[in-house]
Image: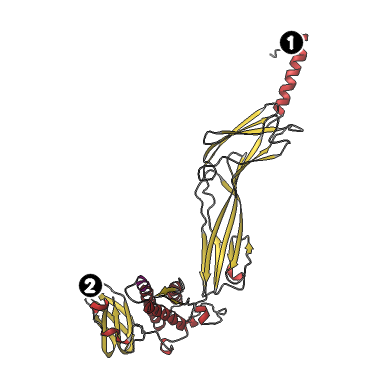
């Protein structure tokens, strides 16, 4: 049964007025949205989102920061926001590290009639760092950088838009940065590369994040920088020349120095790798294995280019690309990369001076084995009680290469393609 309340006639205008005011207030929704902009200097942008009004008339803001401090922006007499849809940039209170504070933010939004709306949100940062994949193959040639970064690790925020801005400059060749916005970039597209070039790489990524609270969003920028050196693969004779430079530099600095030890380690590693490379050519001619060994040697000889000072003199920086000018743009994974036979190489680097083998192992901390009769197989008893590195030389102390195996901690067997005499240096 429907009941009708009786209202005295003298109260009716007041009731109608109150109902009208209630209807207007319900239709008018004071509101705002907030964006945390961390693309450069941190700032908070509060934008009016009020509906149901023809005009705002002015509004002002209070922010309760995570550290408990309340800051007010504007007031009833001097509003921070004048009109519907206007935005106000807040320079927030920062943490001690000058970054945005972590924790709960509460925003109070007032209009000039002192209507108010309050909203709170927790801001917690995740751990996002660039993951740039480098696909570098000097034998193809191909040099591609790809952004594989997972930008979804940013707390409760989800990435909605990812904008990439690559900037690539070829160092020492021009001062211009090439730009690209792709997920991956091919360096061969810039400046006629990628051979024999050093690249200054910069990737600025701007990510727009959404939040479960639709009134909150966040923009953040991430910067990745790197210097990438990409060189053409050397031919066999160039590898030998590179190792010779290391040996000459090692001799120049003199023994009993830290520099000597560093060069000696690099020299020994290169010689061992070149020995493996020689064996590959003789046996299965496996191109992929050969390329990996060449790349390993390149990593050593190009790492510092051996600029060093000693005894008041200076060893000039040695750059293999200045020593040899060969067009490699036609190379496509061919075994002919190594078309120079070891036996044809002139001026092979000597392992040690001719008189080196005359010293005793105790003096030089190296065991020297002498093979006086030509033999395809050298059985070396060294009694060092370890698996030492080995350097092989012919009777003129030129580098030679053979296959070898460790029979036990005191014996090494070296195998050659032909009978040969010479020396083995172990340590």
Residue at image location 56% in from the left, 56% down from the top: 223
Secondary structure that dominates the magenta span: helix
- Look at the image and name its color scheme: secondary structure
Disc 2 packing (10 Å; few <14; some 14–19; many ≥20):
few
The quadrant where residue 89 appears: top right
Q: Label 2, on which residue?
A: 385
152 falls in the magenta region: no
Residue appearing at x 73%, y 18% in the figure: 18
Image x and y of residue 360, in percent: 23, 81
- Measured as percent of width and height from the top left, residue 2 is found at 70, 14
Residue to which mark 1 is pinned: 7
Q: Few, some or many C-alpha atoms within 10 Å of disc 1 (few <14, some 14-19, many ≥20)?
A: few
> Which one is earlier in the sequence, the residue at label 2 or at label 1?
1
For the residue labelled by badge 2, is the local secondary structure a helix, a strand or a loop? loop
Front-lying residue, 6 or 419: 419
Residue 111 on image: x %, y %:
69, 30
């Amino acid at each position: 049964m429907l009941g009708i309340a009786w209202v005295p006639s003298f109260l009716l205008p007041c009731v109608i007025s109150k109902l009208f005011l209630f209807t207007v207030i319900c239709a008018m929704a004071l509101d705002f949205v907030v964006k945390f902009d961390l693309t450069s200097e941190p700032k908070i942008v509060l934008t009016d989102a009020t509906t149901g009004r023809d005009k705002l008339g002015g509004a002002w803001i209070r922010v309760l920061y995570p550290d408990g401090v309340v800051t007010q922006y504007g007031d009833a007499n001097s509003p921070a926001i004048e009109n519907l849809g206007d935005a106000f940039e807040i320079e927030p209170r920062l943490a001690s590290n000058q970054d945005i504070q972590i924790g709960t933010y509460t925003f109070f939004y007032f209009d000039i009639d002192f209507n108010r709306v309050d909203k709170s949100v927790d801001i917690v940062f995740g751990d996002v760092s660039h993951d740039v994949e480098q696909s570098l193959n000097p034998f193809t040639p191909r040099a591609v950088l790809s952004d594989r970064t997972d930008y979804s690790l940013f707390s409760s925020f989800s990435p909605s838009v990812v904008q990439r801005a690559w900037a690539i400059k070829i160092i020492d060749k021009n001062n211009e940065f090439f730009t690209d916005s792709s997920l991956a970039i091919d360096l061969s597209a810039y400046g006629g590369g990628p051979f024999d070039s050093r690249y200054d790489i910069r990737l600025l990524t701007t990510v727009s994040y959404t939040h479960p609270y639709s009134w909150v969003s966040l923009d953040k920028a991430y910067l990745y920088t790197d210097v990438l050196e990409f060189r053409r693969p050397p031919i066999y004779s160039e590898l030998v020349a590179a190792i010779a430079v290391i040996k000459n530099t090692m001799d120049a600095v003199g023994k009993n120095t830290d520099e000597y030890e560093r060069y000696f380690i690099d020299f020994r590693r290169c010689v061992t790798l070149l020995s493996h490379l020689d064996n590959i050519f003789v046996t299965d001619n496996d191109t992929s294995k050969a390329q990996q060994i060449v790349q390993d040697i390149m990593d050593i000889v190009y790492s510092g280019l051996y600029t060093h000072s000693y005894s008041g003199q200076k060893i000039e920086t040695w750059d293999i690309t200045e020593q040899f000018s060969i067009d490699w743009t036609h190379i496509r994974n061919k075994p002919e990369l190594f078309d120079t036979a070891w036996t044809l190489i002139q001026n092979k680097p000597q392992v040690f001076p001719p008189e080196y083998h005359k010293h005793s192992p105790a003096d030089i901390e190296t065991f020297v084995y002498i093979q006086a009769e030509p033999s395809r197989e050298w059985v070396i008893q060294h009694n060092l009680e370890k698996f030492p590195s080995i350097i092989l030389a012919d009777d003129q102390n030129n580098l030679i290469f053979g296959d070898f195996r460790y029979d036990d901690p005191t014996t090494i067997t070296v195998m050659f393609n032909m009978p040969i005499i010479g020396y083995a240096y172990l340590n």
